[in-house]
Image (spheres, helix red, strand yellow):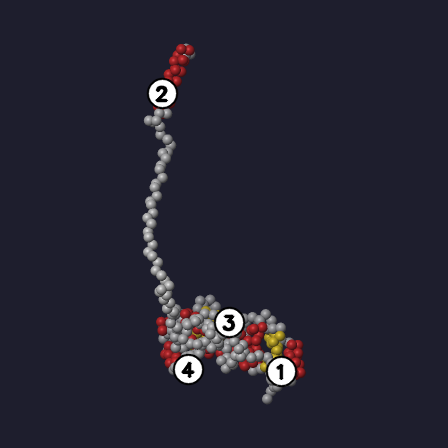
C-alpha cells in the first residue's frame, strides 16, 4: 500500500497539472469561441432616377383607329337561323331597337333590319357563288369514295361533329363547318329537336349556305362533304354573330275562332281534342322525323289530333305547331298544358 506521504505528493502534482491546464485554456490567447459574429453586409444605396416630365395629354388626343367593317361576298341575307325562320312572314313588332346589330357596332358593312342583314341586291354575287360552288365540288365522288368517306364520319365517336338543336341551321354554325373543313374532308351533323320535323329543309340550307354536299343521310345523322377542290385559305368570309338577337313579335298562331268554323264549333273541337287519346308523346330534344307522316295518316280517319308534349316546353310546342301547319297541312286550334290540338280543316 502507498504511504500517506506518497499519496499527498501525487495529489499535489495532479492539482498543479489541473491549474496549469485551466490557466492555459482560459487565457485569451487560446480562447476559440464556437462561432464568430459576422457583421451584416451593407446594403447598396439606391440611386434616385429623375422621371422625365409628363407631357400634357389634353393637347394631343389619343388616336383611336377602329377596325374596318368586315365585307362578305356571300349572296344571302345574314340571319340568326336560316332553317327556322320564314322571310315571307313580316313581324308586327320588335323587342329591341334595330340599331343593335348582333354583329357588333361597325363590324359589318350591312345594316341590321331587326331580323336580318340583307345582302346588296345590285351585285351579281349569286351567280358567282353558284359557279364557284360547282368549281369547288369538282367531279362527283365515286361509290367507293362515298363509302370510305361515310365509314370515317358516320359513327358516334367521330371527333368532327356538330350538334344541330332547336335553333336549326344558325349563322355561326356555317363558320363552325368551315373550321372543321380546315383539317377534315367532311363533318358529321347530328340533328335533334324541332328542326328534325323537316330534314329536307335542313339539308337544303346546309348545302346552300356552306357550299358543301350531303353525301350521307340516315334519320337525323348527316355527313356534309366539302368538295374536291376546297381550299381552306380561300374560304368565304363569315362574320361572327356576337349574341343571339331577340326574336321579333309575329302575329298570333292560334285564333280565337278558327277559319271556317263558328265560335261554338271551335270550342267543341278543342274539347274533343283534349279528350281524345294522344297520337304520339314527344320528348324534349327528340327526333321527330316521322311525326308529319303519322299526323297525315291519322287525319285520314280522324278530324282532330292531339300530341302529348309533356316536358317539351311551351316554346317548342309552338314551334312544332308552326311547322306542322305548313307541312301536313293542318290548323292548330289549341296549345294548353303542353298539349297540341290540330284540326285537319274542312275538306274541299
Is 28 positioned to the left or the right of 293 in the image? left
Q: Earlier in the sequence, mark 2 or mark 3?
A: 2
Residues at circles 4 and 1 in contact by the CB criterion of under 8 Å: no
Which of the two marks, 1 or 3, is nearer to us in this view? 1
What x and y, as percent, mark residue 225? 42, 74
Q: Position of residue 4 (x, y in %)?
A: 42, 11
Please give the residue where the numbered disc 1 appears in the rendered image: 257
Q: Residues within 10 Å of mark 4 (few under 14, many from 20)?
A: few
Tag 1: Cα neighbours inside 10 Å, few (<14), some, or many (≥20)?
some
Between the C-alphas of marks 1 and 2, the distance is 130 Å
Residue identifier under label 3: 165
CA separation in Å, label 4 and label 1: 40 Å
The residue pinned by badge 2 equals 20
Q: Residues within 10 Å of mark 3 (few under 14, many from 20)?
A: some
Residue 121 is tagged as 4
SS label for mark 2:
helix
Q: CA distance from mark 4 to mark 3?
A: 31 Å
Q: Earlier in the sequence, mark 1 or mark 3?
A: 3
Amino acid at each position: 500500500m502507498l504511504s500517506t506521504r506518497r499519496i499527498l505528493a501525487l495529489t499535489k502534482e495532479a492539482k498543479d497539472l489541473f491549474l496549469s491546464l485551466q490557466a492555459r485554456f482560459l487565457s485569451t490567447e487560446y480562447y476559440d469561441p464556437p462561432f464568430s459574429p459576422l457583421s451584416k453586409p451593407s446594403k447598396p444605396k439606391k440611386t434616385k432616377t429623375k422621371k422625365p416630365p409628363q407631357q400634357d395629354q389634353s393637347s394631343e388626343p389619343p388616336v383611336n383607329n377602329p377596325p374596318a367593317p368586315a365585307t362578305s361576298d356571300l349572296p344571302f341575307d345574314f340571319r340568326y337561323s336560316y332553317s327556322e325562320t320564314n322571310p315571307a312572314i313580316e313581324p308586327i313588332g320588335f323587342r329591341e331597337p334595330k340599331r343593335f346589330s348582333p354583329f357588333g357596332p361597325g363590324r359589318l358593312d350591312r345594316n341590321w333590319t331587326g331580323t336580318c342583314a340583307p345582302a346588296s341586291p345590285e351585285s351579281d354575287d349569286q351567280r358567282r357563288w353558284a359557279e364557284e360552288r360547282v368549281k369547288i365540288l369538282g367531279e362527283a365522288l365515286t361509290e367507293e369514295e362515298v363509302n370510305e368517306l361515310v365509314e370515317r364520319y358516320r359513327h358516334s365517336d367521330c371527333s368532327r361533329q356538330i350538334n344541330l338543336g332547336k335553333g336549326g341551321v344558325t349563322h355561326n354554325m356555317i363558320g363552325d363547318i368551315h373550321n372543321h373543313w380546315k383539317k377534315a374532308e367532311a363533318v358529321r351533323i347530328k340533328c335533334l329537336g324541332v328542326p328534325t320535323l323537316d330534314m329536307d329543309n335542313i339539308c337544303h340550307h346546309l348545302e346552300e349556305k356552306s357550299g358543301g354536299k350531303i353525301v350521307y343521310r340516315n334519320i337525323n345523322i348527316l355527313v356534309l362533304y366539302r368538295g374536291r377542290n376546297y381550299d381552306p385559305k380561300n374560304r368565304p368570309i363569315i362574320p361572327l354573330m356576337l349574341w343571339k338577337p331577340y326574336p321579333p313579335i309575329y302575329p298570333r298562331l292560334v285564333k280565337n275562332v278558327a277559319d271556317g268554323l263558328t265560335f261554338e264549333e271551335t270550342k267543341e273541337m278543342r274539347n274533343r281534342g283534349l279528350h281524345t287519346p294522344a297520337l304520339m308523346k314527344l320528348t324534349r330534344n327528340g327526333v321527330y322525323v316521322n311525326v308529319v307522316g303519322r299526323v297525315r295518316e291519322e287525319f285520314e280517319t280522324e278530324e282532330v289530333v292531339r300530341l302529348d308534349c309533356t316536358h317539351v316546353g311551351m316554346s317548342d310546342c309552338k314551334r312544332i305547331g308552326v311547322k306542322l301547319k305548313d307541312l301536313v297541312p293542318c290548323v292548330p286550334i289549341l296549345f294548353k298544358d303542353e298539349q297540341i290540338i290540330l284540326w285537319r280543316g274542312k275538306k274541299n
